[in-house]
Image: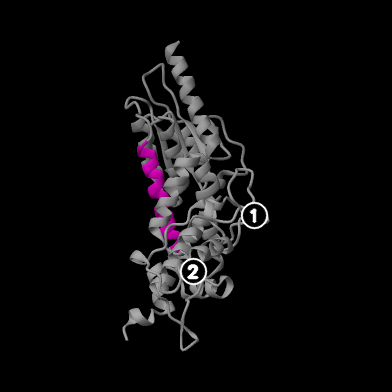
Amino acid sequence: MSDAAHGITTGAVARRLGVSPTTVRSWDQRYGIGPAVRADGRHRRWSPEDIAMLEEMCRLTASGVPPAEAARAVQRTRPAPGAAVPGAAVPATSPQDVPPASTGGAGLPLGSSGRAGPGSGLPLGDVRQECRGLARAAVRLDGPAMERMLQEVLAEHGLVTAWEEIMAPTLHAVGRKWESSGDRYVEVEHLLSWHVSTALRRAAVTGPAVASSAAPVVLACVPGEQHTLPLEAFAAGLAEQGLPTRMFGAAVPAEALDAAVRRSGPAAVALWSQARSTANHSLAQHVAATAFGVRGARTAPLVLLAGPGWLGRTPAPGMVRPTGLREAIGVVSRLYGAQAGSAEA
């Protein structure tokens, strides 16, 4: 008999869905999401109907629905044995089909205890449900699901909330898992970072038109610093305000940063440092003291000390240390507003 008649193995199903065989077996053992028929009464063999049920389980958990609730919803859509399944897919379950859950302060569905349910395998804590959905998609290496979810959270919540409450917590959880698991999850972190970066850059280029003659904001990581995603979020947030930016990326050498500041004449310079070992205070002071413009009307940029590496010191004159993305955007927006008022006067 053919494989279609017998059904396919758990390993083959897992490869098709992009999840581990352990996950598939766990769904069967814990929630009853298993094949309707077993070969020889023991071995799992998955029919097209069974696979369609698993695909729906993946879709729901990727959207942030806790696995137990997703399983109950999937069980209600399970076709009868032998029923026709066009394209081996179950009709998409609507939100109304998912059992009601309690909600957090933001009105988003959470687990029955008031906290998002488990299932991603990452140390997320008490977070938005979209955060758990993104984490599950990342662990499965499900790029299309991550791209879709990132677009949805940016459209629904805006750049700042999407970054601070969904993207950054998921990135931090993946990083902690990698550090504690002996180089596992590196591929998860790389794929998630790439999709977050893509979403942020897409958001940056879809902002309102920027006046080409306006002094820009220079964004750069200090020498030795490779973490660019927070700066990319800052660039996207400034783009939402219609403010011009120049992104120079990771580990910008001091000489290159000096040249970039002198050539672009920025209104502000954001220097990102993730760790104290990379926070270069003398470089920040040099940038803050860099004056440009015509004689008698020379100006120096406002320096934003961005990132946890700068903590522990009081900012020198000409510098500010914002506590988060929202505050950083507000500082720069007010700076441009003040400059516009001065120009009109």
Q: CA distance from mark 1 to mark 2?
A: 29 Å
Sequence-first disc among 1 and 2: 1
Residue 72: where, in percent of width, then height? 56, 63
Q: Which residues are magenta?
A: 188-206
- Quadrant holding the N terminus: bottom left
Residue 252 appears in the rendering: no
Q: Residues within 10 Å of mark 1 (few under 14, many from 20)?
A: some
Q: Residue at x 36, y 43 (%)?
A: 202
- Residue labelled with disc 1: 115
- Quadrant holding the C terminus: top left
Rendered view: 259 above or below 339 = below
| 224 to the left or right of 129 | left
- Magenta run includes residue 190: yes
Q: Residue at x 38, y 49 (%)?
A: 198
- Residue labelled with disc 2: 183
Q: Amino acid at mark 2?
A: Asp
Residue 224: where, in percent of width, then height? 45, 52
Closer to us: 287 or 147: 147
